[in-house]
Amino acid sequence: MTGTRAIQTFEVSLKVALFHRERLLLLQESDTGYWELPGGRIDVGEERLPHAAILAREISEELGPAIRYALRPEAVTWVRQRPTDGAFQFLCARLAEVSDPRLQLSAEHATFRWCVPEDWATLAFPPLSDYRDGLARIWDLRPSAK
């Protein structure tokens, strides 16, 4: 063998695609202005926790304790390069249906929107990401599409 090939390293982020009344929740990052789904990285010590438990922590931190949702089995994955430091993130988004949409945003996000695809066509997503493709695949799997 002439050399060792380089292996890309990724951070792993769990996201949740929250649907309420035929709309998908998107959040605007406070630091970059880009839009994203709620959720975040797996913390040290959470490696063996069920994804649902990690998402519950993230959703409570980002959206407050009042929001109620039912996690579904469907998932979509894609890659994002974080604009602030260039780190690659492997994103895994689970779908969910919201029964109580009361939100209390953390300082991590500036605002939110409940969107349909026509809405997110005008939103800014990180430039080196597959976010639009990921959202399109999520939309195709939404609960009412079945």
Image (spheres, grey):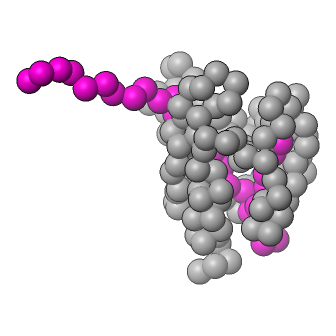
Relative placement, left or right, of 76 versus 35 is: left
In the figure, residue 39 lies in which quadrant?
Answer: top right
Which picture quadrant has residue 87?
top right
Residue 59 point in image, percent of width and height: 73, 40
Q: Residue at x 88, y 28 (%)?
A: 107
Q: Position of residue 111 (x, y in %)?
A: 91, 43
Residue at the outermost bottom position: 146
The residue stretch that appears in magenta: 1-28
Is residue 41 at least partly visible in the picture?
yes
Query: In the picture shown, does residue 51 fall above or below 76?
Result: above
Res. 54 visible in picture: no
Number of numbered discs on residues: 0
Q: Position of residue 37 (x, y in %)?
A: 71, 47
Q: Residue 63 in the image: state x and y as whole percent.
A: 82, 41
- Residue visible at 53% across and 43% down in the picture: 79
Single out the residue that lies furthest toward the left. Answer: 1
Residue 91 appears left or right of 82: left
Q: Residue at x 69, y 41 (%)?
A: 126
Judge by depth and name the residue closer to the eye, 53 or 123: 123
**Residue shown at the point (53%, 19%) measured from the top left:** 44
Q: Nearer the viewer, residue 64 or 3?
A: 3
**Dividing the image into 4 quarters, which one contains the C terminus?**
bottom right
The correct choice, above or below, for 108 with respect to 131 in the image is above
Q: In this rendering, would 13 be left or right of 63?
A: left
Image quadrant holding the N terminus, namely: top left
The verdict on residue 41 being magenta is no
